[in-house]
């Protein structure tokens, strides 16, 4: 069973995720990010269209994922997969350091490492509890 604390951390993460999306749109992230350009080129659409398609699916899926987290058998696996998000979002910080300037999405991405530390600590506690290791 997944702890209520891990569920709460996930729910609290939703607020910065949606605010982060607003920052990305306002600052032109879809037009400068290499992954957005690659995905757009692959699907032969504009970077903005690729951004909106991928992010709307992601944003809508988050509350649905929370409902799936209630299923005891797959919840811990889904929480683990979601944890990858905290690692992926570090690219905003990396790009800002690399370019030595603001990179779209940086301001709200700065909170992800902090949330990620608490998220991973609780996730590891849940895995240890599940498999009897303290």
Image (cartoon, rainbow, N blue to C red):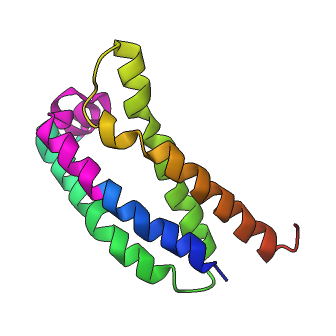
Q: Position of residue 12 (x, y in %)?
A: 42, 66
Q: Position of residue 109 (x, y in %)?
A: 37, 41
Q: Position of residue 68 (x, y in %)?
A: 46, 81
Residue situated furthest right in the rendering = 133
**As drawn, is 21 to the left or to the right of 123?**
left
Chief secondary structure of the magenta portion: helix
Q: Is residue 98 above or below residue 122?
A: above
Q: What residue span does the magenta drawing correspond to? A: 18-42
**As drawn, is 75 to the left or to the right of 66?**
right
Q: Is residue 16 above or below residue 88?
A: below
Q: Residue at image x 78%, y 76%?
A: 130
Q: Position of residue 37 (x, y in %)?
A: 23, 31
Q: Can residue 34 be seen here?
A: yes
Q: Is residue 32 above or below residue 20?
A: above
Q: In the rendered image, which quarter contains the N terminus?
A: bottom right
Using the rendered view, name the quadrant where residue 121 is placed: bottom right
Using the rendered view, name the quadrant where residue 50 is placed: top left
């Amino acid at each position: 069973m997944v702890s209520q604390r891990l569920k709460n951390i996930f729910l609290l993460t939703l607020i910065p995720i949606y605010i982060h999306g607003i920052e990305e749109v306002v600052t032109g992230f879809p037009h400068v990010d290499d992954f957005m350009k690659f995905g757009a080129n692959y699907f032969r659409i504009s970077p903005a269209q690729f951004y909106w398609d991928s992010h709307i699916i992601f944003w809508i899926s988050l509350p649905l994922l929370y409902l799936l987290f209630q299923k005891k058998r797959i919840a811990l696996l889904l929480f683990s997969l979601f944890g990858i998000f905290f690692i992926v979002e570090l690219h905003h910080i990396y790009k800002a350091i690399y370019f030595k300037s603001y990179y779209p999405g940086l301001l709200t991405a700065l909170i992800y490492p902090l949330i990620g530390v608490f998220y991973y600590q609780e996730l590891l506690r849940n895995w240890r509890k599940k498999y009897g290791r303290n």
